[in-house]
Amino acid sequence: DPPRFINEFNNIIVSVKSDVKAGIIFPAVDYDSAYVSVYTDASFANNMDLTSQIGYIALLMDDYGNAIPIAFRSTKAKRVTRSVLAAEAIALIEGYDAGYCIAHEFSRLFGRRVSLTLATDSQSLFTATARGSATGERRLLIDLAALKTGYRNYEIDNLVFVRSADNLADALTKPLIPHALFDLMRTAKHRLRAAQRILRVRSSEKERRSVT
């Protein structure tokens, strides 16, 4: 229903314009603790051709709560997916690709390795990637294999599960007022609120994992 989408879009535009404090602010970021954090999200089969809308937002953050939006994207998935998990996996792959390139460039600028954190509000995807859960969908197996390889090789340093209300990318795939994103735009401050995360310790013998 195109008129409904137009009305929802106009409501969001009005909300943004009415908030005079919302904007992109560039605070001073602590180079020593800076890292890249990418939030991803998908809205399953919500387009008229039954493709899913996927999106991500990448931030440069530090241990003091400073955060700068570096890149964001909202687009249609290139293929129709058979499940919510598959749509979320495509979004996470897109965020992973962008985040890895951004972290690599900042590593060159800072003269040290900049870590990459990925955040998703799909608990099933979080579990499948971190714990290696099996799935019967063959195309999805390829996407999960890419994520698992990046995680195993420490190209992805941290993987976290966040609530939808704390997912900055949620507003890039759904017609809603982005309260969490507005808070970032008003203050240039953001803390990653992880509902679950994987803690990893490098070891010469093996990798220890624990879910908190």
Image (cartoon, rainbow, N blue to C red):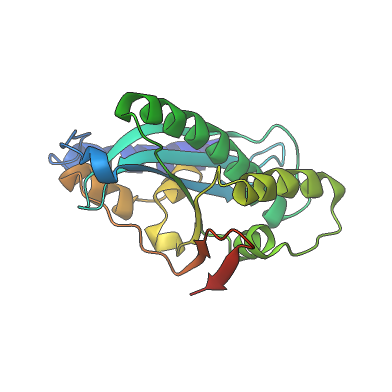
Give percent across and percent down for residue 208. Answer: 58, 68
The N terminus, quarter of image? top right
Give percent across and percent down for residue 39. Answer: 45, 47
Query: Against 124, is 93 above or below?
Result: above
| Farthest residue, direction left | 20
Question: Which residue is painted at 74% across and 47% down in the image?
Answer: 145
Q: Is residue 45 visible?
A: no
Question: Which residue is painted at 26% across and 47% down in the image?
Answer: 62
Locate residue 186: give its quadrant. top left
Question: Which residue is painted at 25% across and 47% down in the image?
Answer: 184
Query: Against 30, is 183 above or below?
Result: below
Question: Which residue is painted at 44% across and 46% down in the image?
Answer: 169
Query: Against 81, is 70 above or below?
Result: above
The residue nearer to you, when weighing 166 against 211, is 211
Locate residue 192: give its quadrant. bottom left
**How many tags in the picture?**
0
Give percent across and percent down for residue 101. Answer: 49, 29
The residue nearer to you, when weighing 112 against 5, is 112
Decide if residue 12 is on the left or right side of residue 86. left
